[in-house]
Amino acid sequence: MAKFLREDNMCFACSARNPIGLKLKFEQDGDICRTYFLAGPEHQGWNGVLHGGLVATLLDEVMAQWLWVRDIITMTAEITTRYSKAVPVGVKLTLEANMLSDRGRLVEMAGRLILPDGTVAARAKAKFLKMDPEKMSKGELKLEQNRGRGTAEEKPDK
Ligand SMILES: CCCCCCCCCCCCCCCC(=O)SCCNC(=O)CCNC(=O)[C@H](O)C(C)(C)COP(=O)(O)OP(=O)(O)OC[C@H]1O[C@@H](n2cnc3c(N)ncnc32)[C@H](O)[C@@H]1OP(=O)(O)O
């Protein structure tokens, strides 16, 4: 487990104290990180279907937690989600993650969302960049580090 846990952590996905959070808990099974989620009506997009942004959130989090429990402190730099089947609310979903590669600061991860019948309804691939644990633990990740990013100086994504 990572050495720092900010007591006021309010992670939307994993904090037990976030009143509107998903309150995910994680288990490790060899090189797999796993969590379960029962989506409710408040998590819908289309009627009866889990919102796609939340599918990506669940996948992002299970991949991030794979790294976190191994003391690899990262931020998501890129995530791609392939939505193969609509994900129903009201059923127990399984989310799994594993590492694909670890090169320098860049870690590539894979995640999948599995329906109760074993169907993989969504898959994600993501790139995580290793961060300075010292700065992250002190909450010193200042937005000023973003200076020059996402401005007219940069070309917008196509
Ligand atoms: C009590 C209970 C406690 C509980 C305990 C809570 C724990 C909880 C933990 C989990 C929680 C997780 C939560 C979910 C994970 C988020 O949601 S993280 C939030 C979403 N992500 C972000 O906000 C990241 C925003 N982006 C950034 O801040 C910056 O762009 C980054 C990603 C930090 C990178 O910036 P940087 O450090 O300045 O690095 P930069 O120089 O841009 O790039 C470094 C190198 O990587 C390369 N690179 C950058 N991006 C990419 C890319 N996408 N692809 C390829 N190469 C790239 C660059 O080209 C560069 O290469 P070189 O030039 O060195 O060859």
Image (spheres, rainbow, N blue to C red):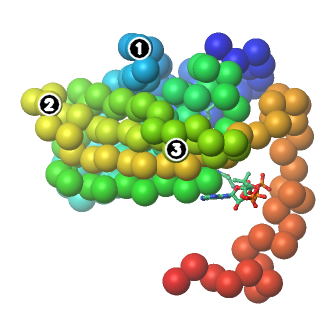
Q: CA distance from mark 2 to mark 1?
A: 19 Å
Quadrant of the frame with the N terminus: top right
- Residue 30, labelled with which disc? 1
Decide: few, some or many residues near mark 2? Use Cα within 10 Å; few <14, some 14-19, many ≥20.
few
Decide: few, some or many residues near mark 1? Use Cα within 10 Å; few <14, some 14-19, many ≥20.
few
**Does 135 appear above or below 106?**
above
Q: What's the residue type where badge 3 is placed?
A: Glu
Kindly tell me whether residue 5 is visible in this rendering: yes
Q: CA distance from mark 1 to mark 3?
A: 18 Å
> Could you tell me if the residues under marks 2 and 1 are in contact, i.e. CB atoms within 8 Å?
no
Nearer to us: label 2 or label 3: 3
Residue 88: x %, y % from top left? 19, 43
| Mark nearer the N terminus (2 vs 3) | 3
Residue 107: x %, y % from top left? 58, 42
| Mark nearer the N terminus (2 vs 1) | 1
**Does 50 appear above or below 114?**
below
Q: Residue at 58% of width from left, 38% of height from top?
A: 102
Residue 153: x %, y % from top left? 80, 84
- Residue 118, labelled with which disc? 2
Question: Tag 1, which secondary structure?
Answer: loop
- The residue that mark 3 highlights is 108
